[in-house]
């Protein structure tokens, strides 16, 4: 059983290695084509500017971006963690509700209700709004 | 080693390679190629063979899907579609791939080289790895992990990081705007997606995709209509398809976060996009359409691919029928529409399972009978809550700085910003 | 399931050891890069890489669920949060100026490290193989039946948990392997109160974070 476990993950690791090899190999092949002069490499300074709708870029490197995306990232992290705690419960819920009856339901519904309160707060404060 | 040989693909290769395994002998395998003591080599070779098979199948599938999409697209528009290369134009995507590979590779001057090259690879890898845990048929899978579906969710979130990386490394304003949007959408739809599966998990009692398929005596699309709808829409958003494809809205952001990519690096993003569609269709098939289950004389693998093709067709159909949403509509839809729907679904499923723990087939049908009316009712109610009102753009405050797609021509201030 | 051959187990454990060192090196290397690299965005990417290597180590420890959660929450969510935060910084490639109080920070880190090392060294490590109570394992694994005859608590709700006949060695190692279900059982059976408090904590985190962030936005307008 334990051996099987590691073999499974060994296969998965192999899969990951091959999954990395495939795109890297494609890039390498494409790169190699420039040596046999199939792929052109004639670069000019104009080609190498960032494409911003045809205009020359304003400044060398843009920085300081919009703050509002941060709300979504924060919401995402919180609800992601919530989901993570619901998964193991959901998997055993059938067995648990046989054993504990309504308690297995009530415990999680309380948990959900508390988190949903925070969700309602976020809604109320217009954090879900794209202003 | 015992449970491992349930995997028929694995067994057929391994047992012919490795000798002296009583488990193989018990299943009627005779002499083997490799001498004793080289089981590890046999294992590795088998693994590489299977994985090579699956990866090649995916890449071929992507080519096939591109062809399929273009042909279907043409039919929708009353055209013929690509028909020059090969029979029915089957080789058109191959020609496209070769062409992309031999294009000139131009990287912007102030791009961050390391991240710029890493991003396309990181974009493709998670989507390939997804296929490692999907059961394509009876005993046809690479690894049936105990945490299968959670593994898929976890791995696919990594593409968000790849998008940020690509956007940032290009050193381009439009790329970064688009990349941030893309990631905001990705993470917003990740939550309803993850929550919508919970109903399925409660019924099947396992995270392993193999078990989930086996427990679908009734396809879960019938038992869990709300879960299916949310999961389907969320995965459409995750794979950047219409009506949620506004990260690539040409009219606003040029080509989006892959604006400054060219040649094979662009090709990899392209590949990732189509692979995402395939992966999404495969996961939907497994979770909701009872995976490889079907009727006897037709092999299970064929059932799986038929269902997957059906899902892909629906995805294409949606793409060519619906217009694209605005970003504020999309985010509101994720956080206010789908999120609430999943909460309703979760509560209802939990109550139903409390009534019928470990349901039989009849009980599953009864659940379906209860779920469908609630499904329509809650969609109607949430539609009322969200409302259909035109978006008011406050041009003085934000509109000028962050243009949103509208039907009206952009005022002068916005044009200069772009 | 037959007893696995000793040689096979030995092989697997050797590979697992090698993999552990590989991923440990990757995790630590990634962490070192985070500290040394100047570009803040690159540091964030290396941090994600370090998280990923940690997830691999969890998988090696047979904590599948924790490993997947590590990827989902840290590599998927927290690194994006960090990347978004990085974009608010003014000078990303230049990095931040070296902070003062390096010696104090180094001392604190060293003390922390020493405490962790001490704890690790002095813990009496046990694994699932050493849990012998069949009923406890059955409860964790989910392979049990409810004994309503002998239990003093027996009522309509069901009885105490007894190991079913099939709770054999398979199930015992299965407790390790299906760690997700075991966690779910424990959350409801033993740790209900911490579970609810966790919900409160999440709600507090969200409300607190929003309250902190809402102020600058209103000022912007």
Image (cartoon, coloured by chain):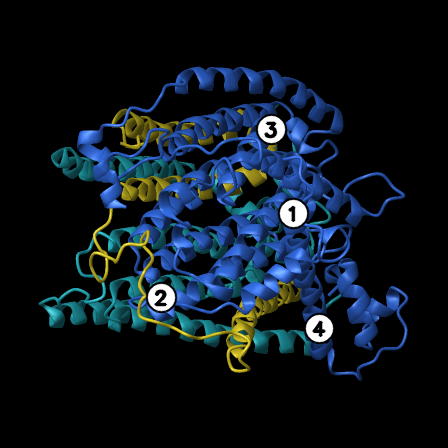
Chain colours: A yellow, B blue, C cyan
Q: In which chain is the residue bearing label 4? A: B
Q: Position of residue B355 (x, y in %)?
A: 61, 22
The part of the image, by quadrant, that contains residue A68 is top left
Residue to which mark 2 is pinned: A47
Q: Is residue C203 left or right of residue B275?
A: left
Query: Which quarter of the rendering shows the N terminus of chain B?
Result: bottom right
Q: In which chain is the residue bearing label 3? A: C
Q: Are marks 4 and 2 on the same chain?
A: no
Residue to which mark 4 is pinned: B43
Q: Position of residue B196 (x, y in %)?
A: 53, 34
Q: Which one is nearer the viewer's eye here, B356 or C122? A: B356
Q: CA distance from mark 3 to mark 2?
A: 79 Å
**Tag 1 near tag 2, CB within 8 Å:** no
Q: Position of residue B83 (x, y in %)?
A: 71, 51
Q: Secondary structure at mark 1?
A: helix
Q: Which residue is rendered at x = 47% and y = 66% of the image?
A: C57
Look at discs 1 and 2 and give the one toward the viewer: 2
Q: Which one is nearer the viewer's eye here, B258 or B337? A: B258
The part of the image, by quadrant, that contains residue C170 is bottom right
- Above or below, C115 relative to B75: below
**Tag 3 near tag 2, CB within 8 Å:** no
**Tag 4 near tag 2, CB within 8 Å:** no
Tag shown at residue C154: 3
Residue to which mark 1 is pinned: B209
Q: In which chain is the residue bearing label 2? A: A
Q: Which residue is rendered at x = 38% and y = 50% of the image?
A: C77
Q: Secondary structure at mark 3?
A: loop
Between discs 1 and 4, the one toward the N terminus: 4
Q: Is residue A2 at least partly visible in the picture?
A: yes
């Amino acid at each position: 059983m334990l051996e099987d476990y590691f073999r499974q993950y060994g296969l998965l690791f192999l899969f990951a290695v091959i999954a990395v090899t495939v795109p890297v190999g494609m890039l390498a092949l494409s790169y190699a084509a420039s040596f046999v002069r199939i792929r052109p490499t004639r670069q000019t300074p104009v080609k190498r500017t960032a494409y911003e709708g045809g205009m020359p870029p304003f400044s060398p490197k843009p920085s300081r971006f919009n703050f509002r995306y941060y709300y979504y990232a924060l919401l995402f992290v919180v609800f992601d963690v919530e989901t993570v705690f619901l998964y193991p419960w959901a998997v055993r819920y059938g067995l648990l509700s046989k054993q504990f009856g309504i308690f297995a339901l009530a415990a999680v519904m309380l948990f959900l209700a508390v988190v949903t309160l925070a969700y309602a707060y976020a809604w109320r404060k217009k954090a879900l709004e794209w202003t | 080693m015992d449970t491992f040989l349930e995997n028929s693909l694995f067994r057929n290769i391994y047992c012919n390679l490795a000798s002296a395994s009583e488990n193989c002998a018990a299943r009627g395998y005779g002499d083997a190629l490799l001498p004793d003591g080289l089981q590890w080599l046999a294992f590795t070779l088998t693994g590489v063979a299977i994985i090579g098979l699956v990866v090649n199948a995916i890449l071929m599938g992507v080519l096939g899907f591109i062809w399929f999409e273009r042909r279907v697209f043409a039919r929708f528009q009353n055209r013929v579609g690509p028909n020059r290369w090969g029979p029915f134009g089957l080789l058109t995507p191959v020609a496209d791939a070769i062409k992309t590979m031999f294009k000139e590779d131009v990287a912007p001057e102030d791009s961050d080289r390391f991240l710029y090259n890493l991003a396309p690879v990181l974009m493709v890898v998670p989507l390939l790895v997804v296929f490692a845990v999907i059961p394509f048929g009876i005993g046809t899978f690479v690894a049936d992990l105990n945490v299968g579906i959670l593994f898929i969710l976890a791995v696919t979130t990594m593409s968000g990081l790849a998008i940020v990386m690509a956007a940032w490394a290009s050193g381009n304003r439009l790329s970064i705007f688009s990349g941030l949007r893309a990631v905001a959408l990705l993470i917003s739809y990740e939550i309803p997606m993850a929550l919508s599966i919970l109903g399925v998990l409660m019924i099947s009692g396992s995270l392993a995709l193999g078990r989930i398929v086996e427990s679908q005596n009734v396809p879960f699309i019938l038992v869990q209509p709300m879960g299916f709808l949310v999961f389907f829409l969320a995965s459409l958003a995750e794979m950047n398809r219409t009506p949620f494809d506004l990260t690539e809205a040409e009219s606003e952001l040029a080509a989006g976060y892959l604006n400054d990519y060219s040649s094979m690096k662009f090709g990899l993003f392209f590949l990732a996009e189509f692979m995402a569609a395939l992966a999404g269709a495969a996961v939907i098939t497994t979770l909701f359409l009872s995976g490889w289950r079907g009727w006897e004389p037709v092999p299970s693998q064929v059932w799986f691919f038929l269902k997957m093709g059906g899902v892909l067709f629906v995805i294409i159909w949606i793409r060519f029928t619906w217009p694209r949403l605005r970003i504020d509509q999309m985010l509101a839809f994720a956080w206010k529409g789908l999120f609430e729907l999943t909460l309703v679904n979760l509560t209802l499923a939990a109550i139903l399972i409390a009534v019928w723990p470990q349901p039989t087939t009849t009980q599953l049908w009864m659940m379906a009978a209860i779920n469908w009316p609630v499904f329509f009712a809650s969609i109607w109610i949430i539609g009322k809550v969200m409302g259909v009102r035109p978006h008011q753009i406050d041009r003085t405050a934000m509109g000028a700085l962050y243009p949103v797609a509208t039907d009206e021509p952009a005022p002068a201030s916005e044009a200069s910003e772009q | 399931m037959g007893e696995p051959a000793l040689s096979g187990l030995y092989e697997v454990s050797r590979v697992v050891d090698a993999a552990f060192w590989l991923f440990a090196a990757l995790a630590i290397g990634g962490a070192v890069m985070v500290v040394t690299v100047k570009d803040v965005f690159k540091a964030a990417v290396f941090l994600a890489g370090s998280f990923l290597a940690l997830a691999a180590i969890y998988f090696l420890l047979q904590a599948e669920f924790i490993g997947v959660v590590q990827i989902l929450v840290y590599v998927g969510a927290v690194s994006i949060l960090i990347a978004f935060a990085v974009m608010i910084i003014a000078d990303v490639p230049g990095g931040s100026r070296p902070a003062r109080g390096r010696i104090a920070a180094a001392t604190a880190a060293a003390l922390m490290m020493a405490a962790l090392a001490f704890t690790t060294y002095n813990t009496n490590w046990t694994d699932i193989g050493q849990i012998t109570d069949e009923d406890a394992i059955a409860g964790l694994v989910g392979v049990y039946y409810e004994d309503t005859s002998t239990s003093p608590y027996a009522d309509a709700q069901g009885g105490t948990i007894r190991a079913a006949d099939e709770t054999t060695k398979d199930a015992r190692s299965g407790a390790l392997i299906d760690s997700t279900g075991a966690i779910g059982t424990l959350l409801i059976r033993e740790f209900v109160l911490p579970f609810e408090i966790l919900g409160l904590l999440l709600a507090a985190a969200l409300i607190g974070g929003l309250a902190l962030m809402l102020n600058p936005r209103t000022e912007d307008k």
